[in-house]
Amino acid sequence: ALAVDPPPRHVISGGRDGQVIAWKEGGQRVGTPQMLQDCFVVSLDIDPRTRTVLVGGAPRKNSNGRNHVAAFDVTAAGLKLEGVLQMPEDTKTLSTIRALPHSGGFVTGRQTLTDTYPLDFWNLGSGSASFQNLKPAITFQGHTGQATCAAPYPGEPQMLLSGGRDGQVLLWDQRAGPQGPVGSFRSDASNKVTCMEVSGSTVIAGGLNKQVCQWDLRMASSQQPVHPRRLVVVDDSVILKMSVGPSGLSQVAVSTFTALYLMDFSTDGNPSIEKGVVAGTPLDGKPADAFYHDIKWEPDLGLLYAAGLSGTIDVYSL
């Protein structure tokens, strides 16, 4: 998993080895890597206002680890651990984490031991509890499959979106409490959502059915699900990750099992697709990866960071 810190532009990475590492723009490590105890990194994000890195950890098989969120401060000397928040005891798997800067907190998706799929909102602005003693401020229920991604709603601090393996993208409003979603965007049951990006009034989501779905957020309704205004087949493989670039929907990076693409979703017609780059093309002679697990833009420099199976991070420029 990857996150990009605002200036001074550190890149934060987390891997299956449990390491969390801060990198300089040129590829040098900053300080000593942090290690999640008996866990691997399942998801991470950074709050750009506070420069707090939120790392979701899931236990290794046959270990004593627990699902948790670790919070780190980004300093000139590297990452500094601020606290570890254990997930509720009924948690089977922590699936995603997303910072919500304008809401003053973050959201986690998880699967419980009874196979429900709640989204928990954690309020960092209450000031009444240390990080490790936080309790969910709101628990949203509505997904019938594991939530795989989440995103803030542009211009609405109290609202957020989540995508799940049930093929839904759901819209939530903290002011409505845990009463269920206030909007639903669907394609079909086979499109288990793997990733989602929001830009302006547009939400795009990729999934296992090899399509990118596009919806208009302004059409959201609590009465009936909204169907996609556009379906795009990128190639004949699963959509893994997407990332909206410096120029918005005209520069959307899309990673599949086959290649890495640059797409333009800014027009009303079919989006243009630049010729794909095979993940891990050996620019420096290193073995090629199969695909990229995560991709993130550094908007000021127009750089795209891509993390793959080999444990390295490739950097692409426009």
Image (cartoon, rainbow, N blue to C red):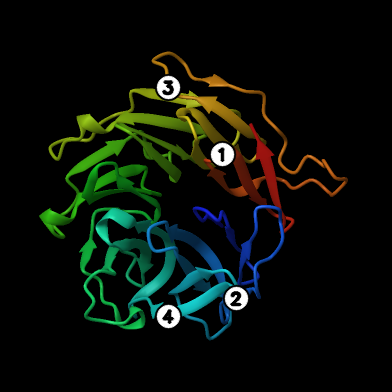
Q: Tell me the kind of residue under disc 2.
A: Gln
Please tell me how crowded label 2 is: few (under 14), some (14-19), or many (20+) other residues with Cα within 10 Å: some
| Element type where label 1 sits in the image | loop
Q: Position of residue 88 (x, y in %)?
A: 33, 77
> Which mark identifies residue 238?
1
Pick whichever of labels 3 and 4 is earlier in the sequence: 4
In the picture, measured across the screen, residue 110 lies left or right of residue 35, that is left
| Element type where label 2 sits in the image | strand
Q: Position of residue 307 (x, y in %)?
A: 64, 51
> Which mark identifies residue 266?
3
Asked where in the image residue 18 lies, by quadrant, the reply is bottom right
Pick whichever of labels 4 and 1 is earlier in the sequence: 4
In the picture, measured across the screen, residue 240 lies left or right of residue 90, that is right
Separation of residues labelled 3 and 4 (CA atoms) = 41 Å
Pick whichever of labels 2 and 1 is earlier in the sequence: 2
Q: Tell me the kind of residue under disc 4.
A: Gly
At a point 49% along the width and 19% down the height, the residue shown is 271
Q: On the rendered image, what quadrant is the C terminus found in?
A: top right
Residue identifier under label 2: 34
Query: What is the residue that sits farthest to the bottom in this orientation?
Result: 64
Q: Tell me the kind of residue under disc 3.
A: Ser
**Mark 3 and mark 1 residues within 8 Å of each other at the beta carbon:** no
At a point 65% along the width and 58% down the height, the residue shown is 24
| Element type where label 3 sits in the image | loop
> Which mark identifies residue 83?
4
Separation of residues labelled 4 and 2 (CA atoms) = 13 Å
